[in-house]
Image: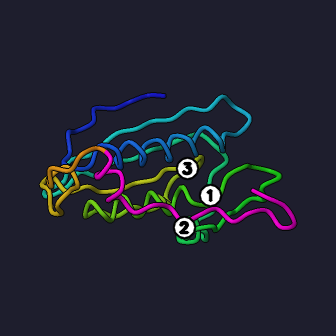
Amino acid sequence: MTPGELPTVPGDPVLLAQLFQNLIGNALKFHGEQPPRVRIGAVERDEEWELFCADNGIGIEPEYAEKIFVIFQRLHGRDVYEGTGIGLALCRKIVEFHGGRIWLDGTVDSGTTFRWTLPKRRIVPLPSDLGLSEEQRAASVPAAPPVPSKPGGTS
């Protein structure tokens, strides 16, 4: 992984860590024949930071740019790549919760690049602003929906 200079942004550290974990995890999971390479960086804009996570993996066709952010929507069968189809939907919720937006960069020639924005100034109250304990804070973050059990069996 190649980290770029990353800014300090206002936000919930648990949620932002989950965002990076999901994006980097996907970059590693959906690697091609070459060893996975991941680049992370940021560009400063007037009122926000535009961040990116770029990889040299199998890529995503532009026509799936919106589908990939819908919960439980998968581009590959579970027999090819494991997963629930929740990760990118959660990334979108996290970024939107912080007042930003996330998208697939359709201009790259190979691999996958996700771009997202985060405001330079806090625009939403965070659980940490409310003086909650760690347990109360964890309970205040919306939970991901339950993963459905496998047909004819248990999960």
Residue drawn at (54%, 67%), measured in percent from left and top? Answer: 65
Q: Secondary structure at mark 1?
A: loop
* Residue density around tag 3, few if under 14, some if 14–19, many if 20 or more, within 10 Å: many
Residue designated by label 2 = 65
Q: Are marks 2 and 1 in contact (CB under 8 Å)?
A: yes
Q: Secondary structure at mark 2?
A: loop
Residue designated by label 3 = 112
Amino acid marked by disc 2: Ala
- Image check: 144 left or right of 122? right
The tag earlier along the polypeptide, 2 or 1, is 1
66 up-or-down from 112: above or below: below
60 up-or-down from 21: above or below: below
Label placed on residue 60: 1
Amino acid marked by disc 1: Ile
Q: In front here: 108 or 17?
A: 17
- 153 within the magenta span: yes
The magenta region covers: 135-155
Give the quadrant of residue 46: bottom left
The tag earlier along the polypeptide, 3 or 2, is 2
Quadrant in the picture for the C terminus: bottom right
Where does residue 68 sit, x and y in percent of width and height? 57, 65
The tag earlier along the polypeptide, 3 or 1, is 1
Where does residue 59 sit, x and y in percent of width and height? 62, 51
Q: CA distance from mark 3 to mark 1?
A: 6 Å
Q: Secondary structure at mark 3?
A: strand
Q: CA distance from mark 3 to mark 2?
A: 11 Å
